Each structure stands twice: as C-alpha cells, then as structure tokens.
Amino acid sequence: MERSGYTYGTLWDANDDPRWDPELPPSQEEIETALADVACKREVNLVGTLMAVEQAYQEELLRSQPGLVHNLNEALRRQQIALEERAEIEP
C-alpha cells in the first residue's frame, strides 16, 4: 500500500477508513483505495498466509489436546439429546 501512496497501519485500516460511508455509493477515492488494497494483498499472498497461520494454530491445538474434538462432539451429542427430550415434553 505504501508504494501506492497509502499509509495505513494494518491490513484492516483501508477497509475501515472512517472516510468511507457505507450508506453512500463509494467515491472514486474509495474505489482507487480498494483496488490498491486488493492488489497489495494479492501481491503478498495475504489470504494464503493467513490461512496457513490459522491452519498451523489449529493443528497445534489438536496435537496438544488430542481428546478435544471427541469431548466437543460428546457435549454436542448430549445437548442434542436434551433438546430432543425437551421437544417431546412441550406441547
């Protein structure tokens, strides 16, 4: 973004710029900023990087807590049973 003349500090700042009013059609400046933002994110493979980091965190969580998915599935199963029992009781 800097090479395109923008000085946003984070990857969300261009999108969250207070000059952009979601109630109004985008201005030419907003469109140009959005195009530069998308081009920059593509150039640095931001989406791919974010996905890889998220995947690494998830894999580490699953490795560090091997019973986590089983425990969550059991909790969901118990909730489903409770909901079904409640539905049978209510008229």
Image (cartoon, grey):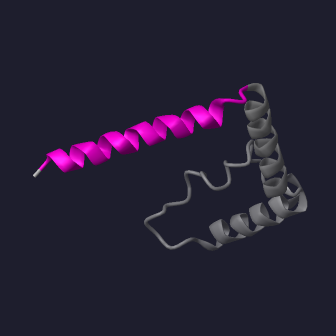
Residue at 57 percent across and 32 percent down: it is 71
Q: Is residue 32 visible?
A: yes
Magenta stretch bounds: 65-90
Residue 79 horizontal side relative to residue 50, left or right: left
62 falls in the magenta region: no
Residue 42, above or below 80: below
Q: Nearer the viewer, residue 17 or 11?
A: 11
On the image, the x and y values in percent for residue 87 come to 22, 49
On the image, the x and y values in percent for residue 28 come to 64, 73
Residue at 55 percent across and 51 percent down: it is 18
On the image, the x and y values in percent for residue 76 come to 47, 40
Which corner quadrant holds the N terminus? bottom right
Residue 36, above or below 83: below
Q: Nearer the viewer, residue 49 or 5?
A: 49
Q: Main secondary structure of the magenta part?
A: helix
Residue 68, above or below 25: above
Which quadrant holds residue 72? top right
Residue 79 horizontal side relative to residue 48, left or right: left
Callout count: 0
Which quadrant holds residue 56? top right
Residue 56 horizontal side relative to residue 68, left or right: right
77 falls in the magenta region: yes
Q: Residue furthest left?
A: 91
Q: Is residue 1 visible?
A: no
Residue 48, above or below 83: below
Residue at 79 percent across and 32 percent down: it is 60
Residue at 66 percent across and 68 percent down: it is 29
Q: Nearer the viewer, residue 86 or 21?
A: 86
